[in-house]
Image (cartoon, grey):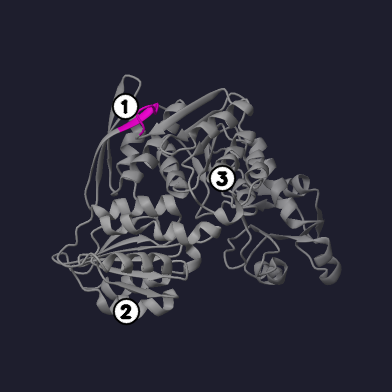
Amino acid sequence: MRPLWTVAEVVKATGGRPEGLSDGPISSISIDSRDIAPEALFVAIRGDVHDGHDFVGKALEAGATAALVSEAYHAAHGGKNLIVVLDTLKALEQLGIAARARNRGQIVAVTGSAGKTTTKEAIRTVLAAYGETHYSIKSFNNHWGVPLMLARLPREAQFGVFEIGMNHAGEITPLVRMVRPHIAVITTVAAAHLEFFNSVADIAAAKAEIFLGLEPGGTALLNADHDHLHILFAHARAAGVGKVVTYGFDESADWHIGKVDTSASTTLAEVTHGGDRYDLRLEVPGRHMVANAVAALAVAQISGEGTRSAIAALARFGAPEGRGLTIRLGPNAKPLLLVDESYNANVASMAAAMDLYSSVRPPDGRKFLVLGDMLEMGPQGPQLHAGLANAVLKTGATEIYLVGAAMRSLADELRHRAESDRDIPAVTHMPTAEEITDPVLSALAYGDAVMVKGSKGVRLSPLVQKIRERFQNA
């Protein structure tokens, strides 16, 4: 089997200069010196916090075949086993572009205000049933994550699935032009990153940038369950997209989701497309998970692979960690039920998560809800947080814990309602996740259910980990 790259191929793709380095295989690419495999290429990227050039020595000592470094680094330090370029991030982009150019597989790109990582995972799960599938790991979806994932694309892969994120207008365009997808998926348009946009309509226009990299004859696959679908259609037409397919609960969707039955651990759904009906079974709860799965089902059909193996693959699909992963901890007879939604939060994902949680029943105890700030909401932040009150109350949670400065608006709203309604549960609000950890851990017991949801920057994932550590052993 041919290696991912050779030194000579990397030099040619980047226009670099080898220093103290002969040709040889490169089997992997990394920007993290702690994650070096044999025959790796280490790319020294300058980040907001760390400069990868400070770790070139460690990467080579760990077994990297070569390090891709800047001219400035080489001028200051010299060294061998180096490929020297003017700009290492630009060189990584060139590697990604070269990897995409030599691959002949079907390429899918996914963006959206919510659900893009879970949808990407559903799509790669489905496509893996048909052939070798390369995909973005974690949330490597930004200006360095996308070219890194592209640079790792094997030349023989039959499918590639790439996540593309943004929080400013203009960020998707250069990334999707590298990826050049055959299928472009937009999971939804909702209030997210409003700190950097004047309106949700502007967010829709920014998401529509994904059409600018679509391959000729490619397909746009759009979730229909939001108020800005017309904007996406208009941008698709302007970009010359020939085929647009929709999916969702909306009656007009090409892939229409009908009846849904959900429990604490599974979801059953009826889906129709044209004259065909599909019965989906997912080993994960939540109506929004059905939409993610149907996007994957549609991708399989658009790719020409059919749907039979896709349906079987989706029956084994589960939510990724931090994005709705449901865990039963402790004794089988009386476990603690943990719903981990700690990775990210905006208005759309909050609504979806709380809709899911409303169907969850504690095994034999109380129902807890821990919510952290939705970050980057801009001037509308207080109003958007307070507006979560109805969704919070519909979950049936009897213990509510709120974290962060923005969540004070929700705490105030709930407390105001409690003045005239004795059934409103008590609310505990703390400025930070660290301050709320001990009160939550002290209150929880086996038999309870708890959902933890908030933006990544609120740092609720350590709380999730501590809950798991305390309750995983009976």
Residue 10 coordinates in the image, percent (x, y): 73, 49
Category of crowding for the residue at label 1, using alpha-carbon neighbours closer than 10 angstroms: few (below 14), some (14–19), many (at least 20)? some
Left or right of residue 15, residue 175 in this image: left
> Is residue 252 rendered magenta in the image?
yes
Tell me if residue 321 can be seen. no
- Residue at the spot x=49%, y=43% of the render? 189
- The CA span between labels 3 and 1 is 30 Å
Category of crowding for the residue at label 2, using alpha-carbon neighbours closer than 10 angstroms: few (below 14), some (14–19), many (at least 20)? few
Residue 104 coordinates in the image, percent (x, y): 59, 32
Rendered view: 140 above or below 75: above
* Three-letter residue code for mark 3: Ile
* Three-letter residue code for mark 1: Thr
Left or right of residue 339, residue 457 in this image: right
- Name which of mark 3 and mark 1 comes first in the sequence: 3
Quadrant showing the N terminus = top right
Q: Do residues under tags 1 and 2 come within 8 Å of each other at their CB atoms?
A: no
Q: What element carries label 3?
A: helix
Left or right of residue 340, residue 268 in this image: left
* Pair 1/2: label in front: 2
Quadrant showing the C terminus = bottom left
- Name which of mark 3 and mark 2 comes first in the sequence: 3
- Name which of mark 1 and mark 2 comes first in the sequence: 1
* Residue matched to label 1: 272
**What range is drawn magenta here?**
250-257
